[in-house]
Amino acid sequence: MTDTSTELALLQGARLKGRLTPETAAVFVGDEGQALLQELEARGLLKAGAAGARLTSEGKERLASLLGEERETAGVGTLTGLYAEFDEPNHTLKEVVTAWQLRPGGTVNDHSDADYDREVLGRVEAVHAVAAPLVERIAAEVPRLATYSRRLAAALARLDADHRFLANPLVDSYHQVWFELHEDLLGLLGLDREDEAKAGRA
């Protein structure tokens, strides 16, 4: 039987990704992802499909229950302070992604200027220098979130060779991992992304 922490990680992964294949499940729970998917499908928490497994109604209820338990045991007061620190690298990363997509003046970046692209990609390292220790401090409060440190570092390591690892949602890119971490923090703190967006923090 899957322990509750691993179960939560996989169910939350299904929520964040929409669908889970054995490969994407491994992002959240390691090589045992395929066996765990089958277990949760057998319990009626996930439903298999051609594009991957998705949450069932029972799975959504179970996820909400497990997140509620995690919230009760987490240091919410400390997390609130850490989330306030999260705003700086979050804002900077949004600027970097915008710069990757649009040149100054608003023209589309066609990636024909290697020097410009190199400068933008270099700014991700500055974001990571602030983000990495912050994510480690967050994981000290909520151990399940420790996987984000590994995933962000892995995306950064692949970025020079494969530029998809900046912001492509179809791979475990830096921005995609960051977005999922943000979603996790919003859920833990009971915050609404739309409200946070209006406040300039999403």
Image (cartoon, rainbow, N blue to C red):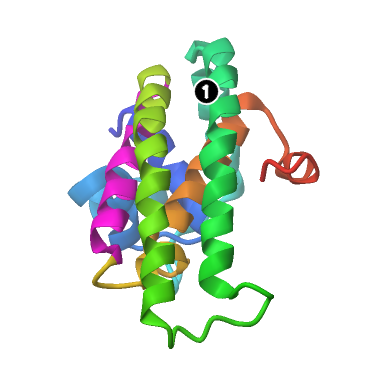
In which quarter of the view is residue 48 placed? bottom left
Q: Position of residue 169 (x, y in %)?
A: 47, 66
Q: Is residue 157 magenta?
A: yes
- Against 122, residue 178 (above or below) is above
Question: In the picture provided, is 159 more to the left or to the right than 126?
Answer: left
Is 14 a magenta residue? no
Give whichever of 35, 130 is nearer the camera.
130
Left or right relative to 202: residue 40 = left
Image x and y of residue 3, in percent = 31, 28
Foreground residue, 104 or 174?
104
Is residue 134 visible in the rendered structure shown here? yes
Residue in the image at 54% along x and 48% along y: 92
The amino acid pointed to by label 1 is Leu
Q: Residue 118: image x %, image y %?
A: 36, 69
Residue 172 appearing in the image: no
- Which quadrant holds the N terminus? top left
Q: Residues within 10 Å of mark 1 (few under 14, many from 20)?
A: some
> On the rendered structure, is 58 left or right of 193?
left
Tell me residue 106's x, y (percent). Answer: 68, 76
Magenta stretch? 142-159
- Taking the spot 59% from the left edge, 65% from the top edge, the residue there is 98
* Residue placed under numbered mark 1 in the picture: 82
Q: Magenta segment, principal secondary structure?
A: helix
Residue in the image at 46% along x and 43% along y: 11
